[in-house]
Image (cartoon, rainbow, N blue to C red):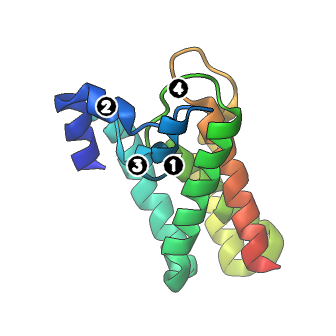
Amino acid sequence: MVAGTILAVVARSTAARLAVVPRQGAGLIGLVTSPFIHLNAAHLAANLPPFLALGALVLRRHETEFVPVAATIALAQGGLLWLFGRQAAHVGMSGVIFGFLGYLLAAAWFTRTTSDLLVAGGVVVFYGGMLAGVKPARDGTSWEGHLFGLLAGVARAWFDTS
């Protein structure tokens, strides 16, 4: 993520080519690359702490499945964004972060284990305000990426617990 931010600051046109651009063939590369691209240090600073915190909780839940969970969320979120997102260059890890949020909350709902419910309670207290990020916004935020990430996380939790 740090390297992607440096790339975006130094070579903005290259970074734009690594974004998810809905319904454009060239925008498909962003399914893999866009989570690592951040427009500036503020964008990175907004994404890095929740990625580390929620990612650590996903890792704690099922250590050997962290990479498949993260990859599934990133690819599903990016694919939905490519199919249904508004015409823009979408970058950043926030879709995956919302996916982690959805995964942790849905896992608690589906399993109802004490540990998952405690984690979900803490996630709601510390990160529940993120859910406002799925409503349409006009400030250039990819609310669609947030929504699709949340849905991808819920779907992955359902898959893992069924």
Percent position of residue 37, x then y:
35, 41
* Above/below status of 112 relative to 94: below
* Above/below status of 109 relative to 114: above
**Pointer 2 residue:** 42
Percent position of residue 21, x then y:
53, 32
**Is residue 100 in view?**
no
* Above/below status of 104 relative to 35: below
Percent position of residue 110, x then y:
82, 72
Which mark identifies residue 31?
Answer: 1
Q: Are marks 2 and 3 in contact (CB under 8 Å)?
A: no
**Pointer 4 residue:** 141
Is residue 50 rendered to the left or right of residue 148? Answer: left
Q: Are marks 3 and 1 in contact (CB under 8 Å)?
A: yes
- Give the foreground label among 1 and 4: 1
**Pointer 3 residue:** 33
Question: What separation in Å lies between label 2 and label 3 (alpha carbons)?
Answer: 19 Å
| Nearer-N-terminus badge (1/4) | 1
